[in-house]
Amino acid sequence: MNLIFLGPPGVGKGTQAKLLCNKYGILHLSTGDILRLEISKKTTIGNFAKEFIDKGELVPDDTLLKMMKDRLCLDDAQNGYLLDGFPRTIEQAKGLNLILKKIGHKIDSVISLYANEDELVNRLIKRGLTSGRSDESIEIIKNRQKIYLDQTSPLLSYYHNVGLLIKINGVGEIKYINDEIIKIVNQYA
Ligand code: C5P
Ligand code: MG
């Protein structure tokens, strides 16, 4: 089973992704986590990505596509995965399609988690107190929400049009939201 989690920063993609990947034994691929690891190791890609991430902006599409192409070809990505935080632009979604075609994979479902902006900003401010992330100050949080609306939210109609999109309310108890997602993805497991 190959899944995509779509949704604004702070909606709970990471939290729900971990629960789901544990349950089904699939690989959790968080592009944000991968980029932060590259930054901590001071690799070429990490050094390049840092200036974008620190401003809350998106790392260029070609960088993400190259990185994910390499990642999806590795052995551990051949038995199911959940993409958390990628694709984030229409260009990335189109590029992902080409990659998947080449390696013979297909996406079973795109789960869109949603919540209102006040809820998201409050969650991220709270998370920023302990996360140690360089992009969780109030201005950067607001910029990330704006970038989501401008650049990522067009993916909702993109995936709706190909019949893959499922929307789930991201406000409520973690366990309840997890059950809602399980009801949907069980058919692909
Ligand atoms: O997904 P997450 O919120 O952890 O991503 C953190 C940051 O990583 C984003 O704000 C963005 O700067 C960068 N990123 C990106 N492109 C992606 C995923 C993450 O530029 N596809
Ligand atoms: Mg995340």
Image: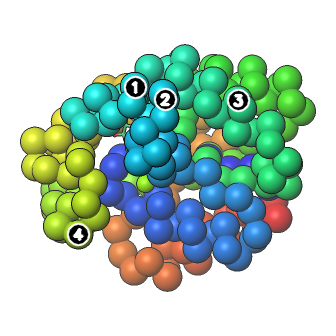
Disc 4: CA contacts within 10 A as few (<14), some (14-19) or many (>=20): few
Answer with left or right where residue 175 lies relative to residue 123. right
| Amino acid type indicated by mark 4 | Thr
User: Mark 1: which secondary structure?
Assistant: helix
| Amino acid type indicated by mark 3 | Lys
Near-viewer residue (109 or 25): 25
Near-viewer residue (44 or 145): 44
Q: Which residue is mark 1?
A: 48
Residue at horizontal 10 percent and vertical 42 percent from the top: 139
The tag earlier along the polypeptide, 1 or 4, is 1
Residue at horizontal 70 percent and vertical 76 percent from the top: 23
Q: Which disc, if any, is residue 130? A: 4
The tag earlier along the polypeptide, 3 or 1, is 1
- Quadrant location of the N terminus in the rendered image: bottom right
Q: Coloured how?
A: rainbow
Q: Position of residue 81 (x, y in %)?
A: 72, 53
Q: CA distance from mark 4 to mark 3?
A: 32 Å
Q: CA distance from mark 4 to mark 2?
A: 26 Å
The tag earlier along the polypeptide, 4 or 2, is 2
Q: Position of residue 7 (x, y in %)?
A: 43, 47
Q: Position of residue 95 (x, y in %)?
A: 65, 20
